[in-house]
Amino acid sequence: MAATTLHAIGRRKTSVARVYMEPGNGDIKVNNRDYKEYFPTGPLQYIVNQSQLIVNVPETYNIKATVDGGGIKGQAEAIRLAIARILVSVDAECKSALRKEGLMTRDPRMVERKKPGQKKARKRFQFSKR
């Protein structure tokens, strides 16, 4: 990649997104596919673009993202966090606008692990007194 390429990592649940951004015409590739093909629904496409829309820089940067793990929504939110982090490294003045929308915070919520002797994380096996 060129010297002007910026890199950031975003995470959400078990999804990890590595995003590379450089000046361009707004081309977004996710795992070497167009993001509209990778994220077929409108809400997921909006999540990917949300950071850029808030800072008013849509179609200013070419974005190449590689994501793995988790589900499709977690992957979209991981990409959103990584893009927000890159935008702040480019222009620190946009940090307050992104923080106000909650895009600078890494969401720590994850699935709780299953415990031994239980059916799921919190659900117990049926109890019989007699």
Image (cartoon, helix red, strand yellow):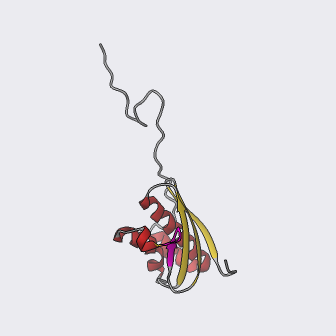
Can you name the residue that lies furthest to the right here?
Answer: 3
Horizontal side of 7 relative to 109 (left or right) equals right
Quadrant, the N terminus? bottom right
Name the spot of residue 56 as percent of width and height, x first. Answer: 46, 83
Q: Is residue 127 above or below residue 14?
A: above
Quadrant, the C terminus? top left
Residue at 51% x, 74% y: name it. Answer: 29
Name the spot of residue 60 as percent of width and height, x first. Answer: 52, 85
Of residues 43 and 86, which is closer to you in this image? Answer: 43
Residue at 53% x, 67% y: name it. Answer: 31
Name the spot of residue 79 as percent of width and height, x first. Answer: 51, 67
Q: Is residue 30 magenta?
A: yes
Name the spot of residue 68 as percent of width and height, x first. Answer: 53, 59
Of residues 120 and 69, which is closer to you in this image? Answer: 69
Can you name the residue that lies furthest to the top here?
Answer: 130
Q: Is residue 102 above or below residue 58?
A: above
Of residues 102 and 25, which is closer to you in this image? Answer: 25
Horizontal side of 67 relative to 123 (left or right) equals right
How many discs mark residues in the rendered view? 0
Q: Is residue 74 above or below residue 44?
A: above
Q: Is residue 23 above or below residue 29?
A: below
Q: Is residue 11 magenta?
A: no
Q: Which residues are magenta?
A: 28-33
Q: Chief secondary structure of the magenta span?
A: strand
Residue 40 sits in quarter: bottom left
